[in-house]
Image (spheres, rainbow, N blue to C red):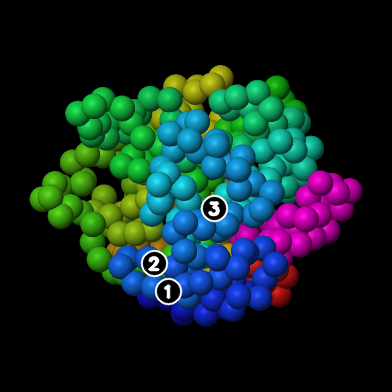
Amino acid sequence: MGKFLETEKSRLSTFKLSSPYFSDAARRDGLYKSKLRPFCVPQICSKENLFPGIRETASAYFLQHEIKWHDAIDKKPSNHLCDSQVCCVNFLYPFVDKPAALIELFRPLYPQIKQVLPMEQDGHFVAFEWIGKENYLGERIPRHGKRTRGANFTSTDAAVMFERLDGKKQIVLIEWKYTESYSRTSLTIAKSGTDRTAIYAHLYERDDFPLDKKLLPGFDSLFYEPFYQLMRQQLLAHEMEIAQELGAEIVSLLHISPKANQDFQRVTSPKLAEIGDSVTAIWDKLQLYPTRFKSISVEEMFHSSLFNGFSRLDNWWKYISARYVWLER
């Protein structure tokens, strides 16, 4: 368990008691994994884990698209205040109906952006838990024959699509981290006994595998979190681009995590440690197609000066900067 997570648990326990964003009922300890915890809200109040301005709309969107909340409570968000999915939704969902603000948010990373485009419904410019239109990675489909967003399949926390100045469409798949940290445990063999390398071997053996095999110590070196997740997401982006999903000619991966969480950057794969001294530095070096991956800290991407002139975001910024105080440190 990382130091950053422990710090956030303590800080948010206090925030819950003193903040105006929670009801009196939500200030009580919440049941999580069979134990009452101060850094959780009661399960009946789990919607209060979201920014007040999106509690109903975000919940309705997840229901409409049958997206799984992590640690879902009756198809509602997790009650854990340090939940990464909730953090992502709190930051990005307020932009779903604000295309001009969304352009300003992404322009520093993608200066060629011209206009954002809806991916799944008109007037909605950010998609969540995107798994692709097809089972591009050949992952096992359950007996009922339906893939689920947010569980059991490779997905990215969010996605945006935009038209570029050169007329091309680009999709950016977004992987969001918050308090995560990982152990040096190989995930090559699943608890069921399945060899995970066999699932993705057909993609690894292709000449266009999106990572540099000359630099990669071996396929098995990728089967440590968070590299295992990054590999699958990079593969998803690559296969979506080949298929030109939704008419996109370019599909890339964007990794966003707090600079304050140094625990996440600890290198877990022994062989990959020879390439670099942090997760994102290693992943950047491994890219066969360098323009298809970017990484940025939450602190660098979100700052108050960026949203000057967007008064509809004022209440959101007050909330986000109060809840995630490391943003402006």
Give the quarter of the figure containing the C terminus.
Answer: bottom right
Query: Which region is colored magenta?
Result: 295-321
Q: Residue at x 69, y 49 (%)?
A: 53
Q: Earlier in the sequence, mark 3 or mark 2?
A: 2
Residue 18: image location, x then y, percent = 66, 76
Q: Is residue 25 visible?
A: yes
Give the quarter of the figure containing the N terminus.
Answer: bottom left
Q: Is 319 rendered above or below residue 249? A: below
Mark 2, residues whose alpha carbon is within 10 Å: few (<14), some, or many (≥20)? some
- Cα–Cα span, label 3 and label 2: 14 Å
- Whether pointer 2 and pointer 1 mark residues with C-beta atoms closer than 8 Å, the reply is yes
- Whether pointer 3 and pointer 1 mark residues with C-beta atoms closer than 8 Å, the reply is no
**Amino acid at dot 1:** Arg
Q: Is residue 308 magenta?
A: yes
Residue 246: image location, x then y, percent = 54, 21
Residue 192: image location, x then y, percent = 12, 50
Q: Is residue 30 magenta?
A: no
Majority SS type along the magenta span = helix
**Amino acid at dot 2:** Leu
Return the residue at label 3: 47
Return the residue at label 1: 37
